Amino acid sequence: MYRCLIAVVAAATIAAPALAQVQRPFPQNALRGTMTFGQPPVVALNGQVTQLSPGARVRDGNNMVVMTGQLVDLKVVVNYTIDASGQVHNVWILRPEEVKMRPWPVTTAQAQAWTFDPAAQTWIKP
């Protein structure tokens, strides 16, 4: 019994640092901004009121989908994508270490001018 417990504890201590370093892959068209959630589907993105698209997905820092009703009045730094109709479609609430990943484009013009490395999840300014 104790051997099983020791094995579980050892496995957990080995796996915990590896899990902490998992990097979420963001698409190349993801922009960064500050989002304040209002009554769904209303959000304020960089101070401008807009809406989430039908079927929008919001993921928390653990990459779990969260219901927007749980986020009312929350102000967070996010990566997001816009759909063809101009509404916010995908939102990733960023963890502190992801916020530190700089530079990251905040406008479409920046994303078009900069170079994206999908493997490293970094942007390079010209």
Image (tube, helix red, strand yellow):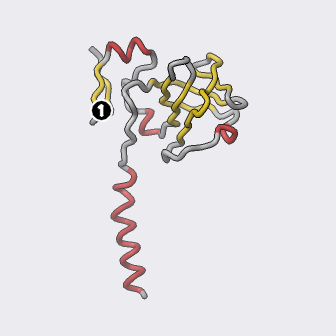
Circle 1 packing at 10 Å, graded few (<14), some (14-19), many (20+), is few
Above/below status of 75 relative to 12: above
Q: Residue at x 40, y 11 (%)?
A: 109
Q: From the viewer's side, name the closer residue of 106 and 88.
A: 88
Total label count?
Answer: 1
Residue shown at the point (52%, 36%) measured from the top left: 93
Looking at the rendering, which quadrant does residue 120 occupy?
top left
**Picture coordinates of residue 100 (x, y %)?**
41, 33
Pick the front one: 112 or 86: 86
Q: Which residue type carries mark 1?
A: Pro
| Residue, far right | 39
Q: Is residue 101 left or right of residue 43?
A: left
Residue 35 drawn at (x, y percent): 59, 27
SS under mark 1? loop
Q: Position of residue 119 (x, y in %)?
A: 27, 36
Figure quadrant of residue 14: bottom left
Horizontal side of residue 118 vs 79, given as left or right: left
Quarter in which the N terminus is drawn: bottom left
Residue extending farthest to the bottom is 1
Q: Position of residue 92 (x, y in %)?
A: 50, 36
Question: In what quadrant of the picture does the C terminus appear?
Answer: top left
Residue at x-position 55% and y-position 36%: 57
Q: Which residue is mark 1?
A: 118
Give left or right: position of 56 versus 11.
right
